[in-house]
Amino acid sequence: MRKILIANRGEIAVRILRTCRAMGIETVAVYSDFDADAPHVRLADQAVPVGPAGPSESYLKIETIMEAARRSGADAIHPGYGFLAENAHFAAACEQAGITFIGPASGVIRAMGSKVEARKLAEEAGVPVVPSAGETDFSSPGFPLLIKASAGGGGRGIRIVRNAREFQESLAAAQGEAQRAFGDGTLLIEKYVEGARHVEIQIFGDHHGRLIHLFERDCSIQRRHQKVIEESPSPAVTPELRHRMAEAALALGRKIGYTSAGTVEFLLAPSGEFYFIEVNTRLQVEHPVTEMITGLDLVRLQIDIARGRPLPEQPTRQAGHAIEARLYAEIPANDFLPSTGTLHVWQPPAGIQDVRVDSGVEQGTEIGVHYDPLLAKVIACAPDRDTAIGKLAYALRRFAAQGVETNREFLIDVLENEEFRAGRADTGFQLPPQHRSSDGRVMAAIARAYIEHMQCARRQVLPSVPIRYRNNPFTSPPMRFEIGGHEFQAHASEPGVEVLKVSGESVEAIVEGVRREFHVFRHADQYYIRSHSAQRTVTRLPRYPQRAGASLHQTANSPMPGQVLRVLVSRGQTVRLGDPLVSLEAMKMEQTIKATMDGLVVAILVKPGEIVAPGQTLVEIQAQEDSP
Ligand code: ADP
Ligand code: ADP
Ligand code: MG
């Protein structure tokens, strides 16, 4: 194997490229028009354009990827995860073209790609499965039930049904969604296991009959049925249970003749029983957790297996504790729907021992609507769980990511949550409402100091101006800013905030007696300000309000292209933060757009059936007079 084409983008393409380079194997990247300047393209030895931004016209197009392999002379293809990684036709096309597919055999991918089929094979291998309602009789396991697309993935197309009344309606909707999103309307109806943890076993098989496992990962912290925090070992798994779960995973792997990397996913019920849910026939997003506790490079193992090398012996112990958090461009207050924009500020934490950051973006990267909104994965490792969690939270606090909304603070809040720390969070875990100290006043004061400095510097052409000097502090009017949906006024001096120095993009100040440094990045009227503890988008408001008493105004925008299904509010209605506003069909699934602040609905700008573009305003909300 001399040259590998990586049929993917983003962090996973970068991750695979690194290992290829370390192994001295030539690489070929593929890229859509949207990704022409992406880091994965620069990191590869060669690159082939594969078409427009839309994934179905580029990264998902089998003939185009095969043609790229032929043209560049690649003798193997690594599919990463997502896109073509679990596409049996693609694996078969590689097999036929004599190109090594770095993954399992196409027949295995086909069998495991159907959750219905995978369940059958698991049962035959003696692996316990979640009680199912079968394909015709939906009544047996009792409510609550879970409806899943048999061909689904990434948490998409999963619905919980709590009573018979909801059932028929959900069933019809789920079928349509599954057909549109995955090209297969087959559904699977399972008992909803309440209070379960998601525990999965990493397996590897080679072409010499050896099948090993690399222990478990606990991925119970999820949103929208997709993992966001993963760790190993699981705080809920004893050595005895680990042994039984690993044996179950290996039994299924043996039954289907598994080769390459795979993950057998289970639900671990509060009773201590565990049930098979599915097999992912690829490298998993959260694989670095396993790399850190085993010291193995899982991509290297996949490549070695594909070129006929034997696997190492079954490892016997997990060294220490590793935990990963997925940093997404998304809006936690809006049901974690993707957020788009430009990454104006991007500075991953550096120099923290045993903290790894995997990402495929950089400062200035455009985060669009076409691809998965994963920005980076941060993985921390330590001798014990508590230290690993603390280190990961520390790294996330130091991770500067501004310009799009992210789940960074959500992740930190989860890591600092007592239930989570105690190892008790299950897949139903929901973060209780957070009470963050409002630092808006301080941020506004910093923004004002920065703006005044820039104005002075422009007028006097001085590199640094002592900012305590002011012409006439008494008449200088306050500056108005919007921060996190609230308005703040910054006066010439702010009690408790003493600005010491402004230079370049940094402001030093003593805040409540503690010296702190703030970084400011300006884009139009937005100031991205960050300190060691907070990152805020500060928007400068016009000096004079349009009309007396004018207050904050917010709009609910569509995060992605879609079609309006229902408008759930009417003009003049009062809404609270989190209330549903509009239901959209986007990414082939139903999505609900929610209010991101309390207020009054002053305008509804769309109608059911209308096609909307990303960023298009759907509803306008105005904060009530005199809100903070
Ligand atoms: P993992 O299962 O590795 O923890 P995710 O569930 O987050 O990771 O999925 C990883 C990526 O693969 C996501 O971009 C997800 O949308 C995509 N994906 C997973 N399964 C499928 C599938 N069956 N069809 C299409 N995309 C999928
Ligand atoms: P996907 O292919 O989208 O990853 P999975 O079948 O792996 O779908 O399920 C994703 C998540 O949904 C699981 O990690 C778990 O949190 C939840 N889930 C799936 N099946 C059940 C079930 N029967 N009971 C309770 N939760 C479930
Ligand atoms: Mg899954």
Image: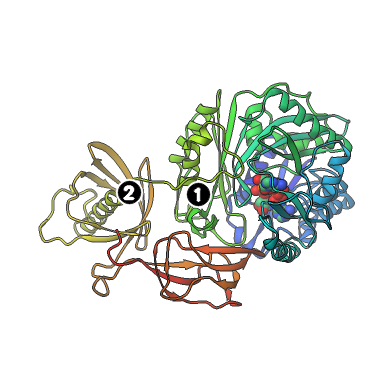
What's under tag 2, amino acid-wise?
A: Ser
Reply above or below: 374 against 262: below
Q: Of marks 2 and 1, which one's residue comes earlier in the chain? A: 1
Q: Check the image and report above or below for 320 versus 405.
A: above
Note whether residue 263 is visible. no
Q: Is residue 123 visible?
A: yes
Category of crowding for the residue at label 1, using alpha-carbon neighbours closer than 10 angstroms: few (below 14), some (14–19), many (at least 20): some
Tell me the quadrant of the picture where the N terminus can be found.
top right
Judged left or right of residue 415, residue 196 is right
Q: Residue 306 appears in which quarter of the rendering?
A: top right
Where residue 80 appears, as percent x and y from the top left, is 71, 47
Q: How is the image coloured?
A: rainbow
Tell me the tag on residue 438.
Answer: 2
Depth order, front residue of 67/344:
344
- In the image: residue 424, left or right of residue 503: right
Q: Picture coordinates of residue 262 (x, y %)? A: 76, 39
Residue 602: % across, % down:
40, 74
Beta carbon of the mark 1 residue lies under 8 A of ligand 1: no
Q: Quadrant of residue 214?
A: top right
Q: Nearer the viewer, residue 15 or 190?
A: 190
| Residue type (three-letter) at the residue carrying disc 1 | Asn
State whether label 2 is within 8 Å of ligand 1: no
Q: Nearer the viewer, residue 398 or 626?
A: 626
What's the distance in space between the residues labelled 2 and 1, CA to CA?
18 Å
Quarter of the image where the C terminus is located: bottom left
Single out the mark in the foreground, 2 or 1: 2
Specify the label residue 407 is tagged with: 1
Q: Secondary structure at mark 2?
A: loop
